[in-house]
Image (tube, rainbow, N blue to C red):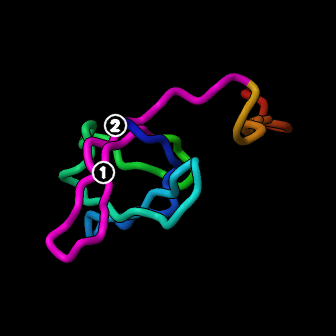
């Protein structure tokens, strides 16, 4: 079953992070090998779909993470870049 959540954190040095389920509950850990698009590192707040698996110790973790498209008009307000006072002469 596919679940959805947002990235809470990701440590590129360790190659691991956690994702907060949209439906609530405890955050799930994941590793770099669980990412389907390994070329790009996840950023805090990004929405991902994922599956869950049970680790040997009995706790669940996220696997098969896939980044989802952000909905228009949701999320951050966006960044406006204004270059004031820069003129080429």
Q: Which element carries disc 2, helix, strand or loop?
A: loop
Q: Where is residue 47 in the image (x, y as percent from the top left)?
A: 52, 41
How many angstroms separate mark 1 from mark 2 (CA)?
8 Å
Q: Say if mark 1 contacts mark 2, CB within 8 Å.
A: yes
Instruction: Count every numbered label the image shows and give the total.
Output: 2
Q: Mostly what secondary structure, the magenta segment? A: strand
Q: Determine the residue positioned at 58% across, 56% down.
A: 24
Q: Label for residue 29? A: none
Q: Which of marks 1 and 2 is nearer the N terminus?
A: 2
Quadrant in the picture for residue 55: bottom left
Q: Does the magenta stretch include residue 12?
A: no
Quadrant in the picture for residue 87: top right
- Position of 42 with respect to 59 (left or right) is right
Q: In the rendered image of this protein, does residue 36 appear above or below residue 5?
A: above
Closer to the camera in the image, 16 or 58: 58
Q: Furthest-top residue in view? A: 72
Q: Does the magenta stretch include residue 51?
A: yes
Q: Furthest-right residue in view? A: 85
- Position of 16 with respect to 85 (left or right) is left
Residue bearing mark 2: 1
Q: Position of residue 26 (x, y in %)?
A: 49, 67
Q: Position of residue 7 (x, y in %)?
A: 49, 54
Q: Determine the residue positioned at 28% across, 69% down.
A: 13
- Position of 53 with respect to 2 (left or right) is left
Q: In the rendered image of this protein, does residue 75 appear above or below residue 14?
A: above
Q: Furthest-bottom residue in view? A: 57
Residue bearing mark 1: 52
Closer to the camera in the image, 85 or 36: 36
Alpha-carbon neighbours of circle 1 within 10 Å: few (<14), some, or many (≥20)? some
Q: Where is residue 81 in the image (x, y as percent from the top left)?
A: 74, 36
Q: What stretch is highlighted in magenta?
A: 48-72
Q: Determine the residue positioned at 48% across, 41% down.
A: 4
């Amino acid at each position: 079953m596919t679940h959805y959540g947002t990235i809470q954190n990701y440590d590129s040095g360790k190659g691991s992070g956690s994702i907060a389920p949209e439906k609530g509950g405890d955050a799930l850990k994941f590793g770099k090998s669980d990412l389907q698009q390994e070329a790009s590192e996840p950023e805090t707040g990004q929405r991902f779909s994922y599956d869950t698996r049970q680790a040997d110790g009995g706790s669940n973790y996220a696997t098969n993470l896939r980044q989802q498209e952000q909905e228009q008009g949701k999320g951050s307000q966006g960044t406006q870049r204004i270059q004031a006072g820069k003129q080429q002469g």
